[in-house]
Amino acid sequence: MNNEQVGVDTDTYDRGIVPAETAARKEREGDRFKNPTDENNQSDLDTTSGYTVDKEGLSNNYAIEPEMYVDEPGDLQQEQEEATAERVSELDNLNQDEEGKLTADGDKRGKGPGII
């Protein structure tokens, strides 16, 4: 069986040689060979991410971590954004108000970007 019969003339790494698994998959899958599946049902789960297909039609699977949430989708992300904004404002205000902190007894001003 040559490349033209199988239809993988540009899909191989070595000219003139078609790997057995590539020819078998091409024959078995037909039109679906090297075409990613479409997600027909519009569910909340994304089942079409996390893989790539190489030149020979073999899939490489990668782990996909779904978004975590407590009550509703997106609520943990909102909490993280609020915590980040609070920390940024805290760091901005840390060294701003220094009045009354430098006395003869000691220096109670901030010592840099963190709280010590």
Image (spheres, helix red, strand yellow):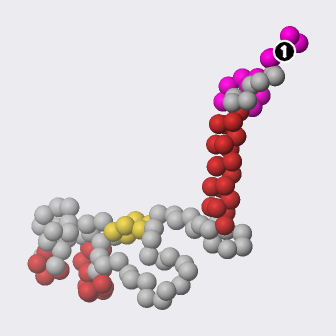
Eyeballing the image, is 6 above or below 66?
below
- Measuring 20% from the left and 66% from the top, which residue is drawn there? 12
Magenta stretch: residue 106 in it?
A: yes
The C terminus - image quarter: top right
Which residues are drawn in magenta?
102-116
Residue 70 makes an appearance in the image? yes
Residue situated in front as seen by the camera: 43 or 92? 92
Q: Position of residue 86 (x, y in %)?
A: 69, 48
Q: Position of residue 14 (x, y in %)?
A: 17, 61
Compared across the picture, whether 27 is left or right of 36 comes to left
Eyeballing the image, is 100 above or below 62?
above
Q: Position of residue 24 (x, y in %)?
A: 28, 80
Q: Position of residue 43 (x, y in %)?
A: 53, 84
Disc 1 target residue: 103
Q: Identify the image quadrant of residue 75.
A: bottom right
Residue 24 makes an appearance in the image? no
Q: Identify the image quadrant of residue 55.
A: bottom left
Residue situated in front as seen by the camera: 53 or 2? 53
From the image, give the main secondary structure of the stretch colored magenta: loop
Residue farthest to the bottom, as pictured: 41
